[in-house]
Amino acid sequence: MIHCKDLHIKQGDFTLNDINFRIKKGDYVVMMGKTGCGKTTILECICGLRNIDSGEIRVNGTEISKFTPAQRQIGYLPQDGALFQTMTVAQNIGFALKIRKWDKQKTEERVNELARSLEISKLLKRKAHDLSGGEKQRVALARALSFYPDVLCLDEPLSALDEDTVTEMYDLLKELKNNHKITVLHISHSKIDALKLADKVLIFENGTIKNINTSEL
């Protein structure tokens, strides 16, 4: 569960006031709104990459606003994937486990498990800069899932992909939704993304977030 209550966020001249929404545990929610309205800012605040000025962020009942990103145990996939270009795929997937001080054997087992699940085992020894766009997103998703997060935040994960790759990613994200007990917040401009994936949709408009069903799109 994600609960944002009375959030006030200031970023230079940009401010967000009285942001309130709640996402039920296990739901796949797509947040939509115009470019520049603050969707990514809210996502980064939830993940601990930006600070809030006041308000509360709760995940599964725990107030996490003062936690470090690692303490929040939230998987995060930024828009560009943000892979370490000179690392191998295996090193990228295992990075979050390394900073959490998993031992080498358990890290290797988890990396191989995710690689099989996301069908990227053949890429493990490749460097990230040699990958296609779809391959990079699969690796970034594996890294975000590596430490068994309860919550996954996705920032426009499909926006830069070709049509065939987007179809593959829809299948992959549907499988994630159906087979894992994980709460997902997915930022997107695409109604198709919402219709294909979402249980609920959050519409961010005029500084207010409204919760709707996909049938209302």
Image: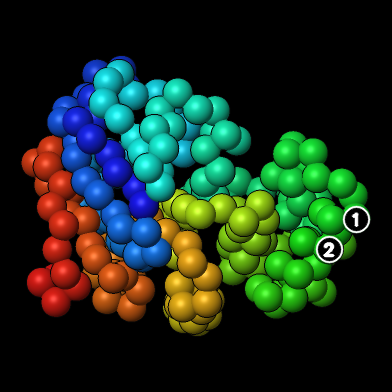
| x, y percent for residue 50 | 42, 28
| x, y percent for residue 96 | 70, 44
Image vertical order of residue 21 relative to residue 184, above or below: above
Residue at 74%, 75% in the rendered image? 116
Single out the residue that lies furthest toward the right: 105
Image-based side of 196 in relation to 136, left or right: left
Q: Amino acid at mark 2?
A: Glu
Where on the picture, by quarter, is residue 111?
A: bottom right
Residue at 52%, 38% in the rendered image? 72
| x, y percent for residue 191 | 24, 69
Q: Split into 4 quadrants, where in the image is the C terminus?
A: bottom left
Residue at 74%, 46% in the rendered image? 97
Q: Nearer the viewer, residue 59 or 10?
A: 59
The residue labelled by disc 1 is: 105
Where on the picture, by quarter, is residue 66?
A: top left
| x, y percent for residue 68 | 54, 28
Q: Secondary structure at mark 2?
A: helix
Q: Nearer the viewer, residue 30 or 6?
A: 6
Image-based side of 203 in relation to 183, left or right: left
Query: Mark 1 and mark 2 in contact (Cβ < 8 Å)?
Result: yes
The total of numbered circles placed on residues is 2
Q: Amino acid at mark 1?
A: Gln
Q: Secondary structure at mark 1?
A: helix
Q: Residues within 10 Å of mark 1 (few under 14, many from 20)?
A: few
Image mark for residue 109: 2
Image vertical order of residue 118 relative to residue 45, above or below: below
Image-based side of 35 in relation to 71, left or right: left
Image vertical order of residue 104 relative to residue 135, above or below: above
